[in-house]
């Protein structure tokens, strides 16, 4: 069914998108050529072994405009639509757009880039310190079989600081495809707290690619929280491209029913003296399935790399399943790399410990499950985001207010 | 004479088909401190964990009454709410849950059972501060996840803090001295001594006499091969220390 998507592209290129500048048209053309060449991935490919996208490939989705939800933005930051940035900041855009999310990394990135039109560009000027969070929301449009390709470009310039939330939501019962690409650049000494929230319906398909490029002494704390969709596939690529860059990658998935989530993360230590810490926790109930693939590359010469990866998966039912695969590729000798993963039910020793203190069995189970999520949420540094997600997870598990003001 | 708080009669228990306890008899009254000593594998920890309701142990015969109730009719959480507390030999780490939240949840579960209103965070904080002060500790690990990354000594302290906050009627200390250096041992013992009262009983399970220099028991029992083979006053512990378990004709 690659043909349906290529035909949709042709219609798109001939109509609404025809006013784009030549350089953008060229990016799209290259992308659709790539997509047409490789087509949708099959489970025969190692990278897609656990995630079957055949239902996506066989659905005649209809291209829709992205339903962006933007709040008022704080001072010190420029937020514009891609359409207006093409006119006002073409050189800036050309320098960054599509430079990090190469179309070769995934057929879905190629597809999203072919339809590149709907986007938000956030630029934090050099030295600016923006403490108020910037929130960009994206809702699945109410339409039949909608397909959207939301694009985000975030550039935090030299020494600047910002906090951003990107949220993908939708409760429509019908089938949909959200195919998002986010490119993030942190120039030297920049700091960004980025929080990604995703909560969609049982028949939603959510495919995402997050590409991070970090220069020296920059610091990125990224937290992604997947609270359910029929299918979620999220590829995260981070390149630590300057000495002293620091990355914290947090992930939490909480799934039930027949939901599926697949996180593929790649952390590329391209330069020496960089640090990356990755913590992914998954909680799977019902017949849900979680996949985690964590690849860490330490390039030749990237000495004194300090990299730590953990992936813990909690199975709340006998039919739930989790697959965890670390992948370390180390080409330098003076490095510290550790990884660990667990898959299993709630620890009976922990359950007994809580019950021996007077907590009922159900309450104990809820608290232990909540703790699995809270551990990840506690690292969110975006004001308001942690509290909101914490409340959401507590409500789901029936765990009363944490009231952290105590002690 | 007051009726016993705990009455164990001819208790037999097994784990995975192996009989560990082979007829234990023990009576504990409010206000008393009983030490249970014995060589490795004698069944000391089995007895402690079984009293708290650990699911790994199967009671094959005998009875245990706690405050007149059949203990085996009660789930672990019901035992805790009735006032039984086990200080674990190996306290479990709980990721993502702070010590203060955990303690408040436990206190409120027990208060609810006793028909008392739940404590809000501020009331709880007050209770906690009083307890911390009473046992001479600060609140430095209240906002850390329960036992997560705690040293051996911190874990044992945390058990005693829970004991102080939950105010049980019977506290069973399972090898609370293991892994403690002498300073930590003294601190823990002082905290326990501060919690001794005429309404509260303790069962102190230990391999070594050392702890009993600091928590002086009223009674000492020697458990060997699943039975209490000798009982006496605090001087029995000293005899054991001098002559060893073999020297007293026990567990040789």
Image (tube, coloured by chain):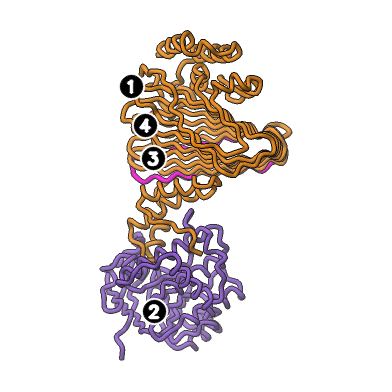
The crowd level at tag 4 (other Cα within 10 Å; few <14, some 14-19, many 20+) is many
Residue A128 in percent (x, y) is at 66, 39
- Taking the spot 42% from the left edge, 70% from the top edge, the residue there is B86
Alpha-carbon distance for marks 4 and 2? 60 Å
Labels 3 & 2 near each other (Cβ < 8 A): no
- Local secondary structure at mark 1: loop
Please report whichever mark, 3 or 4, sits nearer to the chain's N-terminal start: 4
> Which chain letter matches label 4?
A
> Which chain letter matches label 3?
A
Please report whichever mark, 1 or 3, sits nearer to the chain's N-terminal start: 1
Residue bearing mark 4: A230
Both labels 1 and 3 in a single chain? yes
Say if residue A211 shows up in the picture: no
Dominant SS of magenta comes to strand
- Local secondary structure at mark 4: loop
Q: Which chain is orange?
A: A
> What residue range appears in magenta?
A312-337
Alpha-carbon distance for marks 3 and 2? 52 Å
> Which chain letter matches label 2?
B
Q: Is residue B58 above or below residue A95?
A: below
Q: In the picture, which quadrant includes the N terminus of chain B?
A: bottom left
Residue A69, located in which quarter of the rendered image?
Answer: top left
- Local secondary structure at mark 2: strand
Label of residue A144 in the image: 1
**Nearer the camera: disc 4 or disc 2:** 4
Residue bearing mark 3: A255
- Taking the spot 31% from the left edge, 71% from the top edge, the residue there is B12
Both labels 4 and 1 in a single chain? yes
């Amino acid at each position: 069914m690659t043909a349906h998507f290529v035909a949709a592209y042709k219609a798109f290129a001939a109509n609404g998108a025809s006013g784009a500048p030549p350089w953008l048209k060229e990016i799209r053309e290259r992308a659709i050529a790539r997509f047409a060449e490789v087509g949708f991935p099959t489970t025969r490919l190692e990278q897609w072994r656990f995630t079957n996208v055949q239902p996506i490939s066989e659905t005649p989705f209809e291209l829709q405009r992205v339903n962006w939800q933007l709040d008022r933005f704080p001072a010190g930051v420029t937020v514009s639509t891609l359409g207006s940035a093409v006119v006002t900041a073409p050189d800036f855009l050309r320098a960054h757009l599509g430079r990090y999310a190469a179309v070769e990394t995934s057929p879905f990135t190629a597809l999203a880039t072919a339809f590149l039109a709907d986007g938000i560009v956030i630029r934090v000027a050099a030295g600016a310190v923006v403490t108020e969070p910037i929130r960009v929301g994206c809702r699945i449009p109410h339409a039949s079989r909608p397909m959207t390709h939301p694009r985000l470009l975030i550039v935090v310039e030299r020494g600047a600081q910002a906090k951003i939330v990107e949220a993908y939501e939708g409760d429509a019962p019908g089938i949909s495809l959200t195919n998002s690409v986010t490119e993030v650049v942190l120039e030297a000494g920049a700091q960004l707290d980025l929080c990604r929230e995703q909560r969609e319906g049982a028949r939603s398909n959510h495919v995402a690619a997050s590409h991070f490029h970090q220069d020296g002494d920059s610091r990125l704390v990224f937290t992604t929280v997947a609270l359910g969709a029929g299918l979620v596939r999220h590829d995260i690529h981070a390149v630590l491209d300057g000495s002293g860059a620091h990355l914290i990658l947090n992930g939490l998935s909480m799934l039930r029913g027949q939901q599926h989530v697949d996180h593929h993360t790649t952390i590329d230590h391209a330069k020496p003296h960089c640090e990356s810490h990755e913590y992914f926790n998954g909680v799977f109930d019902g017949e849900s399935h979680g996949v985690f693939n964590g690849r860490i590359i330490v390039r030749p010469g990237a000495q004194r790399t300090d990299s730590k990866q953990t992936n813990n998966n909690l199975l709340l039912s006998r039919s739930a399943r989790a697959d965890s695969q670390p992948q370390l590729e180390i080409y330098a000798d003076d490095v510290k790399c550790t990884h660990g993963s667990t898959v299993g039910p709630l620890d009976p020793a922990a359950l007994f410990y809580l019950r021996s203190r007077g907590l009922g069995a159900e309450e104990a189970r809820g608290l232990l499950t909540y703790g699995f999520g809270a551990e990840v949420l506690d690292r969110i540094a975006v004001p308001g985001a942690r509290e909101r997600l914490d409340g959401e997870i507590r409500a789901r598990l029936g765990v009363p207010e944490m009231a952290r003001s105590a002690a | 004479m007051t009726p016993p708080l705990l009455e164990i009669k001819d208790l037999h228990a097994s784990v995975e088909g192996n009989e560990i306890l082979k007829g234990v008899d023990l009576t504990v009254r409010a206000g008393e401190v009983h030490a249970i000593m014995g060589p490795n594998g004698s069944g000391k920890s089995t007895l402690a964990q079984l009293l708290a309701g650990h699911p790994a142990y199967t009671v094959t015969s005998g009875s245990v009454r706690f405050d007149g109730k059949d203990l085996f009719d009660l789930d672990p959480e019901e035992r805790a709410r009735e006032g039984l507390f086990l200080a674990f030999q190996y306290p479990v780490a709980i990721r993502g849950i702070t010590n203060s939240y955990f303690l408040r949840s436990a206190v409120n579960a027990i208060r609810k059972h006793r028909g008392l209103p739940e404590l809000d965070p501020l009331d709880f904080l007050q209770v906690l501060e009083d307890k911390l002060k009473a046992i001479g500790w600060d609140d430095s690990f209240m906002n850390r996840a329960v036992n997560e990354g705690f040293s051996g000594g911190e874990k044992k302290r945390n058990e005693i803090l829970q004991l102080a906050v939950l105010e049980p009627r019977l506290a069973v200390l399972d090898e609370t001295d293991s892994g403690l250096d002498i300073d930590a041992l003294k601190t823990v013992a002082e905290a326990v001594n501060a919690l001794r009262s005429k309404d509260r009983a303790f069962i102190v399970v230990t391999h070594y006499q050392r702890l009993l220099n600091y928590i002086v028991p009223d009674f000492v029992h020697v458990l060997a091969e699943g039975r209490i083979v000798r009982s006496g006053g605090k001087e029995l512990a000293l005899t054991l220390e001098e002559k060893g378990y073999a020297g007293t004709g026990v567990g040789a």
